[in-house]
Image (tube, rainbow, N blue to C red):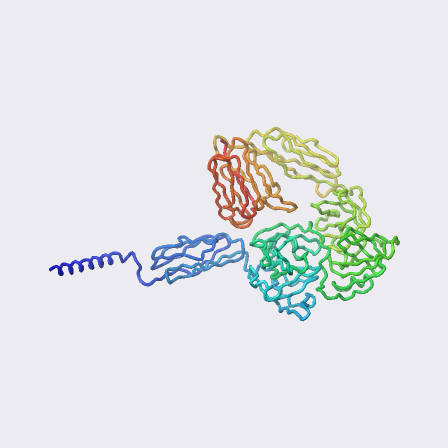
Amino acid sequence: MKLKKLFLGSFALTAMLFAQSCDDKNDGPTGAPSIELSTQTLDFEKDGGSQTIKLTATRDWNVTNVPDWIAVDPKSGNPAENKEVTITVLENTGMDRSQDIKFTIEFDGKTLTVNQKGTGSASEVVVYHNDFDKELAVKGESGWKTYLDSFDGWKNETGSGISTVEYAFSGMSARTNSSGTSNSQFSDYQGSGKNYLWFAKDNYFHVKNITLPEGKTNYTISFGSERNLYQAADNTFVPEEFLVYVSNDGSKWVKLEYAFPNGLKNRRWDLASSTFTVPSGTKSLHIYIKATLASAYLMDDLDLSVAASAGTAIDFSKGIDLGTGGSTGGGETPEPAGNTIAAVCAAAAGSAADLKDVLVTGVTTQSYVITDETGSVLVFVKADPKVKVGDKVNVAGTTGEHNGLIQITAPTTAVVSSNNTVTYPAPLEFTEANLADTPKKVTYVSFTGNVKKNNQYYNIYIGSVTDKDLSLSYYTGNMDEFVDCDIKVKGWYVGGGTHYQIVATEVEKVETIGPKFSVSTTALTAKAGDTSASFDVKGNVKWTVASDNAAYTVSPASGDGAGTVTVKFAANETEKDVTVKLTVSTTADVATKSYTVTLTHKGKSTSVGGEEVMVSVDKAYLAANQNGKMDDVISYTNDSDYGTTAVTELRVYKGKNLKITAVEGYTITKVEFTCTKNCGVKQGFYVDSPVVVDSGATSKSTGAGKIGTITITGTTSSVKYTAESNQMRVEKMTVTYKKL
């Protein structure tokens, strides 16, 4: 009986467990693991957006392999029939992109391919690329003889702009070895390997006349490089030893600042890059690369591509004369060019020049002009030439192309005699009419023009021509005394495209030529409490000023020549801005007879009793004002040092601070930055960067797209944002505040 009861009890327990298992079967796995998607591909436009797919799964599922530009909601789930999953894609400011997203369920999975349009495919944006790997460079028994002029296995350029490309170089060879290639164990980027370029003594590498795509202004240059000086204890890359320049005409060069993604490395290949913006209408680009330390630097994978967004603004008019760039020598002894200047100029760049008893007819601080019965040529010394006009000299050197003309570089000079008679030919007169016709050889010229100073450069303009200017090459005198004046010049034209280089022999300050008339600004701003504002009238003619608002009087109301006009008015007690038009005009025979100067007299703050006020400043104001006032309440300071950089927005450099301050009695509640790129990306707003507010207040930083927001809780009269991760470039700033 006892056994029977035990058996029945066991049977009952088994039956109960079985019943419980049957009751729970709908909450566990059902069938074999499987997952299905309603589509395998989603396509998005560059603006981004959201799309929904259907998902069916028999097990719990999750999503992997999701990049930061895609959001998936939800990212996981339980077994479901026709579960909706939303795919959201951010705006694409770069090239076309694609990503495979993995939906996984135990041992099964499906892939969803997300495609998004951008600025184009890689093949569409590459303007110039050279991996230098057309033919493998081989070391000979006596060393590397694969100089670029005797071995063309490095010419492996591709891209949309290569049809017009030419090269100039000196001290350059193509090399390869098992450990030195850009795809070796010493490389931190996936380089092309095989050949690289070696920068030896007196080196440079010049890519000429890359044709730029029409309508594009934003570009990125990138290149692989490493420092590998033989037996050096430290081979950390030094950017000051490896210089990169760009030019639109091969005449004036602008230095590019570049960076490696993970900093400077010791004897390791990495890919450096620089993004920049050229002026609209720029049709071609030259690239010039030089190592100031010989036999230390290697380069591979040189690339110029269309960039998705703007970079450093390039002003070619502020470029410098490098004094070289045309020689094609690679290390072999150049062929002789002949014993007359005409023969030297007719020979190919890279030829040997050896001239005897030629006359010095022009001198600068870095060069001199020599003349014989066949012509004239510039000799570039890159130092005090230690000769004077009237010397006869023997000159030996190598020819190179610069500013579109042949010159002699790396010369040795011996003075044969001095105080010889110099007779100049009748000069070619440069005028507005013929300035576009560039001389094809060194030519004696004359002209009269007005001198303008742009940072450290002095440009001379003839008449109303602004797309071409002249400069006195390494002038021996003081150009500051000529600024904003007309000068008459005689001298040697020694080359140029947009910028004509002149070795001056005579410079004379002259009386102002013809009537001139302009104003210092066409926009004035006054704070609500201000009672005056001023601007300058420039020129040499009679003029008058009239105000369209009787409450805003001008003094003086007329003048003759240069003068300062002061506008007087009462403080603005209203909450609205007052706009006043000031018309400055002349009856003189000038191109522009009238200017309108717009005065904006700001209204008082509308914040009363805790009501919030929002004030914004745009890109143009931020570019012009590194520190500024947004209204009578809010001002800002930026401790970044732009140097000579021309900015098109407000820039807060890495490690620098932007401080926004409210006057006493007001508190800031929110600050919003609109940046040039998305939050968390270089040149954008950084959520993780420090924000400092007054004691007793707290802040929260958030970012979405190009907008970065600082929200304030509590009372603060100032907000200090530190660009800790990288620089920030701001094209709009909005501050919300209220009266306490």
The foreground one among 424 and 393 is 393
- Tell me residue 570's x, y (percent): 61, 28
Q: Which quarter shows the N terminus? A: bottom left
Q: Is residue 531 visible?
A: yes
In the displayed image of the protein, which residue is found farthest to the bottom?
141
Q: Quadrant of residue 495?
A: bottom right
- Tell me residue 275's x, y (percent): 60, 53
Q: Quadrant of residue 231?
A: bottom right
In the displayed image of the protein, which residue is found farthest to the left?
1
Please determine whether, in this image, residue 424 is positioned above or below residue 566.
below
The reply, left or right, for residue 344 in relation to residue 536 is right
The foreground one among 464 and 374 is 374
Residue drawn at (58%, 36%), measured in percent from left and top? 629
- Tell me residue 353's x, y (percent): 79, 62
- Tell me residue 88's x, y (percent): 45, 53
Q: Quadrant of residue 361?
A: bottom right
The reply, left or right, for residue 183 in relation to residue 59 is right
The foreground one among 510 and 230 is 230
Please determine whether, in this image, residue 593 is positioned above or below residue 529.
below
Please determine whether, in this image, residue 603 is positioned above or below residue 64.
above
The foreground one among 708 and 379 is 379
Q: Is residue 428 visible?
A: no
Number of numbered discs on residues:
0
The reply, left or right, for residue 379 in relation to residue 523 is right
